């Protein structure tokens, strides 16, 4: 076996182990998440994250179009909202309201958005849905 073949084999093995470990982390954090979503979120966390721990929970929350409706995401989403609320105790944050959109991540219809980023005031995600009164899906 050439060194390059060996290198490829070893790297694939490490990649696979990394992904399997990440899947185990997700199963521990959000028990009950469908296996297809676990694998997909783990893949993104292994390839996109590049060591960045900012908003790592979004890889999991964004596996669903309506995280606030998923029982297995409830606790993680509540933790996120609590963290964002704490962040807002720093008075440099302010919000605007835009009643054309509601937040599909946390389900808020308060229409409050961070005045700097335009993200949801409650969960700090960019997952706005037009407010027709109907939940039409993405
Ligand atoms: Zn939200």
Image (spheres, rainbow, N blue to C red):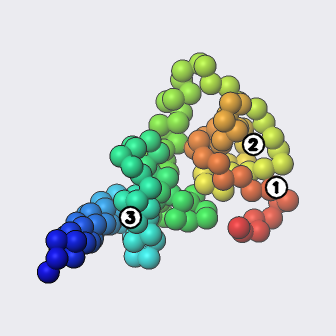
Label 1's element? loop
Q: In this view, does 130 lie to the left or right of 74?
A: right
Badge number at residue 42: 3
Residue 49, placed above or below residue 36: above
- Image location (x, y in percent) of residue 10: 19, 70
Q: Is mark 3 on a helix, strand or loop?
A: helix
Q: Which mark is residue 131?
A: 1
Give the residue displayed 65% in from the left and 42% down from the top. 120
- Image coordinates for residue 40, horizontal then vertical, percent: 44, 69
Q: Report crowding for label 3: few under 14, some 14 to 19, many 20 or more residues within 10 A (C-alpha).
A: many
In the image, 131 versus 35, the foreground residue is 35
Residue at (59, 18) in percent of width and height: 91
Disc 2 crowd, CA 10 A, few/some/many (<14, 14-19, 20+): some
Secondary structure under tag 2 reads: loop
Quarter occupied by residue 110: top right
Find the distance from the CA under tag 2 to the CA under tag 3.
Answer: 31 Å
Q: Quadrant of residue 32?
A: bottom left
Q: Does the residue labelled 2 lie within 8 Å of ligand 1?
A: no
- Residue at 55% x, 65% y: name it: 64
Disc 2 + disc 1, Cβ < 8 Å: yes
Q: Residue furthest front?
A: 2
Q: In which quarter of the image is the N terminus?
A: bottom left
Q: In this view, does 111 lie above or below 19?
A: above
């Amino acid at each position: 076996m050439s060194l390059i073949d060996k290198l490829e084999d070893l790297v694939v093995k490490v990649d696979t182990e990394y992904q399997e470990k990440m899947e185990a982390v997700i199963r521990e954090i959000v028990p009950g998440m469908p296996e297809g979503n676990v694998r997909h979120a783990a893949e993104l966390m292994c390839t996109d994250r590049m060591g960045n721990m900012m908003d790592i929970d979004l890889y999991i929350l964004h596996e669903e179009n309506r995280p606030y409706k998923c029982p297995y995401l409830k606790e993680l989403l509540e933790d996120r909202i609590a963290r964002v609320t704490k962040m807002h105790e720093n008075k440099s944050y302010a919000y605007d309201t835009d009643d054309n959109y509601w937040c599909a991540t946390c389900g808020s219809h308060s229409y409050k958005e961070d005045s700097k980023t335009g993200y949801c005031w409650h969960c700090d995600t960019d997952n706005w849905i037009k407010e027709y009164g109907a939940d039409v899906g993405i």
